[in-house]
Image (tube, rainbow, N blue to C red):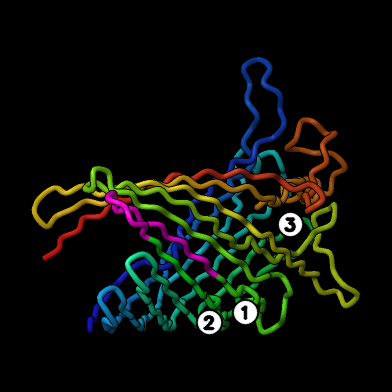
Amino acid sequence: FGIGAYYKPRLSFESDYSEEIRNNRNTDNDGYPEKLAQNLIEGKGTLKQTGITASWGKSLGDYTDINFGIDYSVLNGDITREKTIRWTDWAISQVVGNNLPELTETEDYELSGSQIKIGGAVQLNTHFGIAATYIPKTTLTKEGSYYYKRDAYLNTAVDSTNVLVDEDYIMPTEIRVGFAYSPRNVMRTKFNLDVEYVQYSEVDMLNGDPVGAFDDVVNFYSGVEHHVTNRIPFRLGFQAVNNWYFNADTPNDAEGNPIVDEDGNPIIVYYAKKLLTPMITAGSSVAIAKNWTIDLGFGYSWREYEATDMFGDAYYNDKIYTGSSSYVLWPNSHIQLQNRGWENPDKIRENNISLNAGLNFTW
């Protein structure tokens, strides 16, 4: 029988994105396109997990045993996210007698709740083992505020929203089954395979309304550990994990105005893209002293997906703010500043390298 306690970061909401908007002036005579605006997205906060765990095991024979464990944890975190557009002094000075509206969008909320995890493992004989874990659907409370403000311009009033947020933040059910195989050899080789089923359809709700955006996914994790000269372990692994890129957007027309329904309410479009992230890993352990070892790990992952702009181009169309038929901030008047939709998305390629090190002491 064993008991334990732990504390760890579960989800990170940290982000820091910066983007300069410059006009289309050419670079003749050592000139450079003027900077019109600065876009920022900044996020802070971590969902932290603190838990206790208990396990029980019993030997059923010389090479057979059974184990069962249960885990209870509390999750909480304070999250903030701010998205801003700020015009430069140069841009403001060019639009004489008119206002260039700045934009601020802020989310500030707290996540809190609890989670249960149960698992079991059976060693069948000297070669085979099987295990499973189950994490039921976890519903966290999301409480805070949402603030949006776009300044007034020309004949358009300030667009300002400040509302309280009280909704659910759902973490879906996870079911994982693992297999372990140790062939009979002198090199102490071990093979492992995990299959994970995540029920994302359980989070297919937004403010209590079904969205119909997510499907359940299946993830795979595999690895092999081989002891070189029966002492130094060498590990190789591969995993394929699915998750979702989701957004709720209010599309605009060519002039940058929200598209509305027959009742005059802005139309909200929900879209979701499944992201597959393969990853290869390698690692080893090194004994540095009696009872002390260091674990080293390396991982490389990659993925490709499509996405639209985080800041639509129509916002920088100064003709909207001046009422003029020609641009003031853009020397080339033949461009069409419009928000791009899913008819012309960007293709994004991401590569990630991770390094992990752990120090272990046993007694």
Give the magenta-colored segment's residue range. Answer: 182-196
In 3D space, how far apart are the residues under numbered discs 1 and 2 (Cα atoms)? 8 Å
Is residue 186 within the magenta segment?
yes
Q: Position of residue 281 (x, y in %)?
A: 42, 48
State yes or no: residue 28 in magenta: no
Dot 3 surroundings within 10 Å: few (below 14), some, or many (20 or more)?
some
What residue type is disc 3 on? Tyr
**Left of 313 or right of it: where is 129?**
left
Task: Please name the amino acid that badge 1 sits on.
Answer: Glu
* Residue drawn at the location 39% of the way across and 79% of the way down: 120
In this rendering, which labeled residue sits more in front, label 3 or label 2? Answer: 2
- The quadrant of the image that shows the C terminus is bottom left
Disc 1: which residue: 202
Quickly name the residue at label 3.
Answer: 153
**Disc number at residue 137?**
2
Residue 179 figure quarter: bottom left
